[in-house]
Image: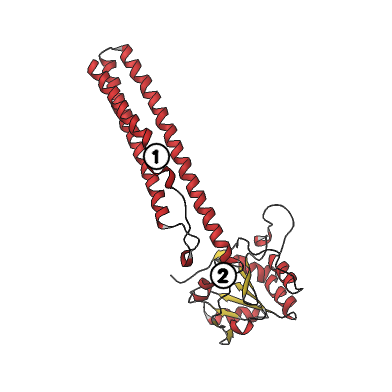
Amino acid sequence: MKRNLISALTVLAVLATGSSVLGQAEEGRLRPRAVEGPGAGRPRPEFRLQVQRLQQQIDKLQAERDAMVKELKAIHAAATEEKATKTAAKIKELIGKQQKVYQVRLEELKVRQQRMQQAARMQADRQERPRRGGRRAPTPLLTGFDGKIVKLADHQDQIVVLEWFNFECPFSKYHHEAKRTMADLAEKYKDKGVVWLAVNSTHHTTPEANVAFAKKHKLPYPIIDGRSGRVGRAFGAKTTPHMIVIDKGTIVYDGAIDNAPLGKVQGTGDPVNYVDNVLANLTSGQKAPLSSTKPYGCSVKYKK
């Protein structure tokens, strides 16, 4: 029985010592640093490695805890079988105490992990914002499904609205069938020099279907062939609809058409058409009231 008790205390001493220093070596080095340049918006590879190491620490600590508890329970069972009541009670108490110690350490590591992940997301958001509002707009040569060429470079002195569009998506259809949101806005600002273009980046769509849709709904602007995905990816289009407003070659708004997907306001308050507000300000010589919102809708069906 003495051998069992000595074995139990040895296990506790070794494992408790290991757990007390677990992860301390990297405590001061776990700091997210953002990638600059083409990979902006993502944490550096070494930070991702640090996150992986932290997860490995958590896994190791859990494995040590499980091993300790298993061995102590075996010793407790042996003590119970030998009717060493006081020894068994002592070991059981030690099991409870050590489980709490490990649990506290695990919680500390998990909190650190959550903070690191949150810091990484915040860093990515900070890196993303400058790229969304205020960056120079690409000027690719565009081709409409009607065969006509559109040169964005020819509209460097104008306001241009790009509407990512997919007539198969209920969110896009709502703004063309249940409402005429897009067509009405394009008409409203046409005489103020605003150029409106729809872009369909759905890889499986056809020219005939887009031409028929434009004719049926009497769209006052062309639908651009974006099936290659080149244009959509250049502008970072994610959903249909996804709106990009360009003023004199600079992206001044990137996001949703409004705050009411399928006519249902998100949160409290009244419906707000973000693009209408942006265009109203720009055409009156003022700055855009906001630079970005989160776009909603179906994902853009890029070719894989």
Which residue is pictured at 47% across the width and 67% down the height?
38
Which residue is pictured at 32% across the width and 16% down the height?
88
The answer to whether 157 is drawn above or below residue 49 in the figure is: below
Tell me if mark 2 has few (under 14), some (14-19) or many (20+) residues whose alpha carbon lies within 10 angstroms of its own.
few
The image's mark for residue 24 is 1
Q: Earlier in the sequence, mark 1 or mark 2?
A: 1
Tell me if mark 1 has few (under 14), some (14-19) or many (20+) residues whose alpha carbon lies within 10 angstroms of its own.
few
Residue 42 seen in render: yes
The answer to whether 262 is drawn above or below residue 232 in the figure is: above
Give x and y (percent) for residue 258. 67, 63
Give x and y (percent) for residue 53. 37, 47
Secondary structure of the residue carrying numbered label 2: loop
Residue that numbered label 2 is attached to: 168
Secondary structure of the residue carrying numbered label 1: helix
**Amino acid type assigned to the residue bearing label 1 in the image:** Gln
User: Farthest left residue?
Assistant: 3
The answer to whether 202 is drawn above or below residue 296 in the figure is: below
